[in-house]
Image (cartoon, rainbow, N blue to C red):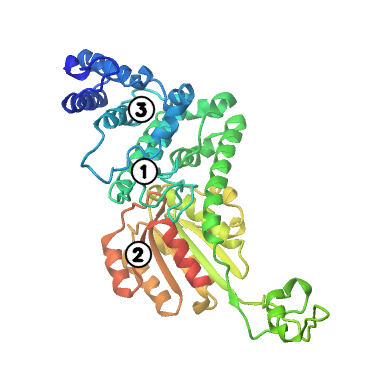
Amino acid sequence: MTGEAVEGAPGELPGADALDNRRQVLYWRLLARLFDPEEQAALESASLAVVEDIGLPPALLDPQTSVDSVVQRHPELAAEFDGLMTPEPDEDGRDRAAEVRRAALVSKVLLNVFGPVSGAVSASQLSRWQSDAGWLERALGCAPGELRSGRPGAGGGPAGRGVSPTGTGGRGGTPDLSTLIPAIGPDLGAIEADLVSRMRLREVLADPGLAAKLTPSMSLIEQLLRDKNNLSGVALANAKALIRRFVDEVAQVLRTQVEKTTVGALDRSVPPKRVFRNLDLDRTIWKNLTNWDPEQERLYVDRLYYRHTARKTTPQRLIVVVDQSGSMVDSMVNCTILASIFAGLPKVDVHLIAYDTQALDLTPWVQDPFETLLRTQLGGGTDGTVAMALAQPKIAEPRNTVVVWISDFYEWRAEPLFESMANLHRSGVKFIPVGSVTSAGRGSVNPWFRDRFKDLGTPVISGHIRKLVHELKTFLT
């Protein structure tokens, strides 16, 4: 196997069979290391020969070396990782030599992200894994952090990516990654959550140097929120700093999505205010062109035209009810931030209620998602009837009210809760049941509730948080 893998003199391009053998060696080595951390001597030596012969650094084969370290020493490789794993549009006439190089780079990313990590996890190990996971996301044509739950990508485009929404990553064609990306995102989040759970988090937070190495993520924020009552002093201050940083990052992305549409349509029944800033100069010139004096080269203006700026804005009340049980942490964080953004829009009165077996009215803090999250108590069972008891008195004008209910709807008292929800809908309230509000867009919903919501004409929204943003903007505009 070793001889086949390195067949050909230096500088001489091997034949197609030898190139295929090289690629197979690299992938067999990847599989062996994923399932067994021990080295397989023959595969390791063959892979080293392949990597050196194609001009790549041997560090690509070291699972302990991060992709960041490799790229730092060899900056020219950074561009090759972007879109590395997006499917090629044409399999005919493919460049086998390029595929061998690609196999080496793909193996590096996959082994660093999915390779086994045993025992306790340090802050440095978590930070390195998060960085390597970011390179995997870039290789799939996404923004770093986009596939892991809780942090929408900060790139452009409708999917929030820095590349096309199909995930081509700058390569030719438009392959469809829609079946792969939703599947891999939650798995990355699960690996990250496992690493965080194996950290001695309290010890890390108590050391400013170690805490500074942490990168805020949904998994880490969940742990911090669960453990916040057991932290004090430096550890609590570092925990709050990580939570605020994460909140600010997510809010920046969501705010952009919300503010693309201004609430309220132009009210042309109200005469435009005749001030200079509202002057419609183009229309004024166009309407007065008949008054142009060619001899004096002057335009005489008989009438000034102004732009309408007044908007029809009926006060709308938005009531967000969020299940804060253990299975809904991602939704709790995202919707708390989203509620604060809508609370900053004109003519929108936002109320926020969190519940498990007890309900908590978080409306006084809705403008500050950081303070809101610090007041949540994650975990426990689920009894939506206690939340409904808080929500119903807030509905003064049903037709100007939207109730967003975020839960997996695995409820203790399902029948009475659904009946009260149906009554809200029949009264004229815009009722929006939401099964998950995450970045990954995957969440389970109680089939009993799903079927009844569908029959009621209010199907459950399950998927990316952008869907909820769209529904709310449609109602409030």
Please tell me which residue is depicted at 36% across the width and 43% down the height of the picture: 171
Q: Nearer the viewer, mark 2 or mark 3?
A: 3
Amino acid carrying label 2: it is Val
Toward the right, the furthest residue is 296
Q: Nearer the viewer, mark 1 or mark 3?
A: 1
Q: Are marks 1 and 2 in contact (CB under 8 Å)?
A: no
| N-terminal label among 1 and 3 | 3
- The CA span between labels 1 and 2 is 36 Å
Q: Nearer the viewer, mark 1 or mark 2?
A: 1
Q: Secondary structure at mark 1?
A: loop
Q: Which residue is mark 3?
A: 112
Q: Which mark is residue 413?
A: none
Which residue is more in the foreground, 131 or 157? Answer: 157
Please tell me which residue is depicted at 35% across the width and 37% down the height of the picture: 84
Q: Secondary structure at mark 2?
A: loop
- The CA span between labels 2 and 3 is 38 Å
Amino acid carrying label 1: it is Arg
Q: Are marks 2 and 3 in contact (CB under 8 Å)?
A: no
Q: Which residue is mark 2?
A: 460
Q: Picture coordinates of residue 435 (x, y %)? A: 36, 58
Please tell me which residue is depicted at 41% across the width and 64% down the height of the picture: 385
Q: Picture coordinates of residue 309 (x, y %)? A: 67, 75
| N-terminal label among 2 and 3 | 3
| N-terminal label among 1 and 2 | 1
Q: Picture coordinates of residue 31 (x, y %)? A: 23, 27
196 lies above or below 243:
above
Which residue is more in the foreground, 403 or 64? Answer: 64
Q: Which residue is mark 1?
A: 171
Which residue is more in the foreground, 204 or 11? Answer: 11
Q: Picture coordinates of residue 47 (x, y %)? A: 26, 19
